[in-house]
């Protein structure tokens, strides 16, 4: 089983957490792979794929390489929807687990809110960062739970 990480969109703290989880697992066949359009500083033994820069190049590579039953971590709702439809377990950086329908609904709400802001009918979004230790903890808990479930499913006959 592979954990596919959208390296272009994830915070450094999340990259570190995923690397620590990968280093602590001794399960054969388990690996973490970061896919990005730029080189990432990752520890030895962590998978990394650097794609040519371009719109959705990393997303396309993950979608092409991933298999049903794998786990993916991304903040990209379009990618989350694609991967969930392909049978992957998909988490965002806040520990939310997406089905294809969840991702599609969240993307629809995001796009509609952007249209309302563009028309001047809704206030602009605050650019204040709202991701910190609480979100990291929620992600870690959700990741560990989903990883345990995915590994158990992979072992079933």
Image: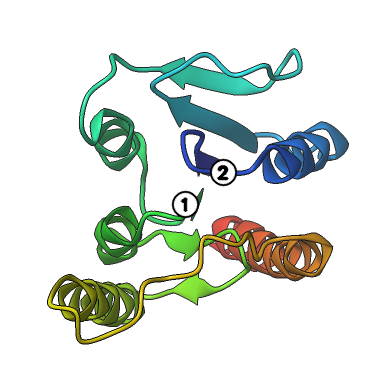
Q: Is residue 94 left or right of residue 49?
A: right
Closer-to-camera residue (48/40): 40
SS at badge 1: loop
Residue 82 vertical placement versus 125 (above, below): above
Q: Residue at x 68, y 61 (%)?
A: 131
**Residue at the extreme bottom of the image, as rendered:** 121
Closer-to-camera residue (131/25): 131
> Residue 71 at x, y = what percent?
51, 53
Q: Residue at x 66, y 64 (%)?
A: 152
Residue 69 vertical placement versus 32 (above, below): below
Label at residue 10: 2
Q: Is residue 55 left or right of residue 68?
A: left
> Residue 99 at x, y = what percent?
37, 75
Q: Quadrant of the N terminus?
A: top right
**Residue at the extreme front of the image, as rendered:** 120
Q: Residue at x 43, y 26 (%)?
A: 36
Q: Compare marks 2 and 1 and give the one earlier in the sequence.
A: 2
Label at residue 74: 1
């Amino acid at each position: 089983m592979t954990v596919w990480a959208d390296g272009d969109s994830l915070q450094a703290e999340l990259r570190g957490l995923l690397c620590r989880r990968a280093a602590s697992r001794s399960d054969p066949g388990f690996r973490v792979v970061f896919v990005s359009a730029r080189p990432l500083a990752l520890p030895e033994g962590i998978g990394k794929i650097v794609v040519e820069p371009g719109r959705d190049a990393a997303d396309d590579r993950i979608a092409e390489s991933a298999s049903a039953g794998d786990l993916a971590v991304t903040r990209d709702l379009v990618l989350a929807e694609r991967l969930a439809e392909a049978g992957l377990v998909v988490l965002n950086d806040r520990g939310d687990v997406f089905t294809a329908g969840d991702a599609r609904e969240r993307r629809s709400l995001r796009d509609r809110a952007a249209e309302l802001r563009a028309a001047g009918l809704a206030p602009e979004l605050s650019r204040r960062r709202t991701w910190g230790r609480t979100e990291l903890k929620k992600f870690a808990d959700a990741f560990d739970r989903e990883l345990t479930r995915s590994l158990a499913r992979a072992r079933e006959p």
